[in-house]
Image: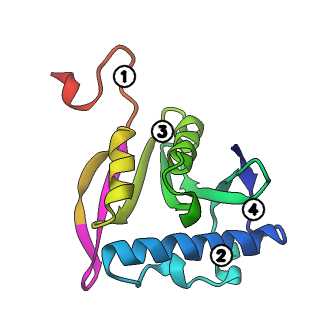
Amino acid sequence: MHITGISPHDDPLGGRLLGLQHAAYAVEAELIGDDRIPPLRESLEDLRGEPLTWVGAFDDGGRLVGAVAWTESADEVDLDRLVVDPAAHRRGIGRALVEEVLARAGGRRIVVSTGRDNKPARALYERLGFRGRGEHEVIPGLWIASYLYERPAPGRPRGDDAG
């Protein structure tokens, strides 16, 4: 697997990214029992209009199998999208993509949200050290869970190990 910066403005990559995004969010919609996930309905024009930084994961054959996108400020990275080809689940692609964002974030905190009932995504974030920040209803009947990642100070344990 090879991870590199990508852009939805590149053709034909933009169309492949949109198809990957729709396939990935269709899986989440099924997991959470709700298809009102905005990226599931995006057009290519909508996708290209989002101010996101993207990296993609490519398999050995050069096929896009996953991507992650974020926005950032001086002190925070907002992990906006994580999409993995449903045919490539359970191969460490999502983990590798999130780890790429962790590396690029430096010392900044990282925030992310996912469907409250998306157990695989929640487990991934928790395994990587994200802490739950709560759940809330974004529109009637659609719940999300929010997470925060903060690097521990040097020499200080993370999370529950802090004493």
Residue tagged by mark 2? Answer: 19
Of marks 3 and 2, which one's residue comes earlier in the chain? 2
Q: Amino acid at mark 3?
A: Arg
Of tags 4 and 3, the one toward the viewer is 4
CA separation in Å, label 1 and label 2 = 40 Å
Q: Amino acid at mark 2?
A: Gly
112 to 14, vertically: above or below = above
Residue at left 54%, top 50%?
73
Q: Amino acid at mark 4?
A: Ser
Q: Amino acid at mark 1?
A: Ala
Residue tagged by mark 4? Answer: 7
Residue 87 placement: quadrant: bottom right
Q: Please state if 111 lies on the left or on the right of 160 as rendered.
A: right
Residue at left 54%, top 48%?
91
Of tags 1 and 4, the one toward the viewer is 4
Secondary structure at badge 2 equals helix
Secondary structure at badge 1 equals loop
The stretch drawn in magenta includes residue 137: yes
Residue at left 48%, top 80%?
38
Of marks 2 and 4, which one's residue comes earlier in the chain? 4
